[in-house]
Image (cartoon, rainbow, N blue to C red):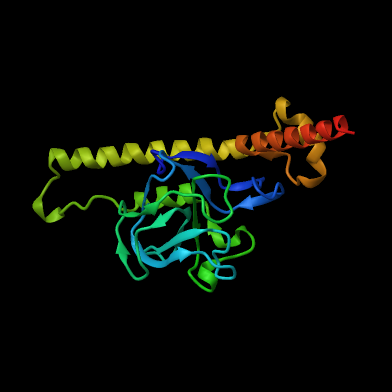
Amino acid sequence: MNPFEGYRLTSPFGWRIHPVHKTRKFHKGVDLVISPANGPLYAFVGGEVLHAKMGATGSGFGNYGNTVAIKDDKGYLHVYAHMSSIAVVVGQKVKRGDRIGNQGSTGISTGPHLHYEIRKNTSPSFGFTVDESGVVEPTQYLINYYGQQQPVVDKGEGPMTAEEKKRVEDLEATSKAQAEWIKAEKAKADMPCPDWAKAAYEHYKDYISDETGSYEFWRLLVINYRKEKGFKVNKEAGK
């Protein structure tokens, strides 16, 4: 089961070529897209709103644009960035599925999307760290988090009803499917350089420490290489 059902994943967690700065940088969250461009966004988990405004430089949310940050019951901070509008306030308690605002492209962004990351701490600077040590992979975290919220069965009432038994069986089947999906996603991150990306790899290999990456990483590397190559060709033609 995909915890981001209804969203289109445009950039996964991990190393990538930054779409704006064009340098190799660790992506500390995931980029998700819904339609329409200003569509509503809902909380993936419940908790307390600690931040609900434009991210300021030095705050831990610089360049994040309109940002909502929610602390869950385990102390982790769920960050929703680049929003066009915000529908919650600091101190508010929200539940999973509550609307928190709308998708947008505020801050440093190439287009309407949601940047979603999960930080291990809430302070200082809302848990911001320069490297990836302060964050967790969002997909696996949500799968684990949802899996711990199992249906409660009152053992004092005797055997489970048929409906309760069906709920437990559905939960077990969902957990198995989730594990298989995560295994497949992780395998993608260890993908060797494909033939169609070898020219780009050779061009950038002095700047790449690993010879494996996700499909999305190789795709972005090729796109950046083609853009750079096209720019040089056009520049030569203009001489």
Residue at the image point whose x is 15% and y is 44% from the top: 160
Q: Would you identify the image quadrant in which residue 235 lies?
A: top right
4 in relation to 98, above or below: above
Q: Residue furthest top?
A: 195
Which quadrant is the N terminus positioned in?
Answer: top left
Q: Residue furthest left?
A: 157
Residue at the image point whose x is 64% and y is 52% from the top: 26
158 in relation to 239, above or below: below
Q: Position of residue 163 (x, y in %)?
A: 15, 39
Q: Would you identify the image quadrant in which residue 216 lies?
A: top right
**In front here: 194 or 43?**
43
Q: How many marks?
A: 0
Q: Is residue 59 left or right of residue 176?
A: right
16 in relation to 218, above or below: below
Q: Is residue 65 left or right of residue 165?
A: right
**In front here: 207 or 85?**
85
Q: Residue furthest bottom?
A: 124
Which quadrant is the C terminus positioned in?
Answer: top right
Q: Position of residue 205 (x, y in %)?
A: 80, 41
Q: Residue furthest front?
A: 238
Q: Position of residue 87 (x, y in %)?
A: 35, 59
Q: Is residue 134 left or right of residue 168?
A: right
**In front here: 221 or 64?**
64
Q: Is residue 155 left or right of residue 19?
A: left
Q: Position of residue 21 (x, y in %)?
A: 69, 50
Residue at the image point whose x is 64% and y is 60% from the top: 131
